[in-house]
Image (cartoon, helix red, strand yellow):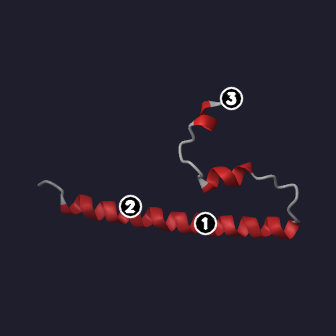
């Protein structure tokens, strides 16, 4: 038994569950929908990263020592 199975880093992590799913029973339309949903999620995550970077830059600028 793998230690990751006993002590997962994030219990019930949706990404971990997603990659474990068997794709065999899914139709081509379902697979295309899945891909589109993942692309939308990538855009959402990238936008969040950009927002976090801007926030951090603003904070760094505010607290920059002269």
Residue 21 spot, x, y in % from top left: 76, 53
Depicted 2 relative to depicted 51: above or below: above
| Residue farthest top in this picture | 1
Please state which of the two labelled residues, at mark 3 or mark 1, is closer to the viewer. Answer: 3
Depicted 66 relative to depicted 36: above or below: above
Left or right, residue 39 beside residue 66: right
Q: CA distance from mark 3 to mark 1?
A: 32 Å
Q: Quadrant of the C terminus?
A: bottom left
Q: Earlier in the sequence, mark 3 or mark 1?
A: 3
Q: Residue at x 82, y 68 (%)?
A: 30
Neighbor class of circle 1 (other Cα within 10 Å; few <14, some 14-19, many 20+) is few
Residue tagged by mark 1? Answer: 41
Observer-nearest of 38 and 14:
14
Residue 8 spot, x, y in % from top left: 57, 41
Q: Quadrant of the N terminus?
A: top right
Q: Earlier in the sequence, mark 2 or mark 1?
A: 1
Observer-nearest of 32 and 20:
20
Q: Residue at x 67, y 64 (%)?
A: 38
Observer-nearest of 18 and 54:
18
Residue tagged by mark 3? Answer: 1
Res 19 label:
none
Residue tagged by mark 2? Answer: 53
């Amino acid at each position: 038994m793998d230690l990751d199975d006993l002590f997962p880093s994030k219990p019930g992590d949706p990404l971990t569950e997603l990659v474990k799913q068997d794709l065999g029973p899914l139709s081509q339309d379902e697979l295309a929908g899945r891909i589109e949903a993942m692309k939308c999620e990538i855009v959402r995550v990238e936008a969040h990263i950009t927002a976090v970077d801007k926030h951090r830059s603003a904070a760094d600028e505010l607290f920059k020592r002269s």
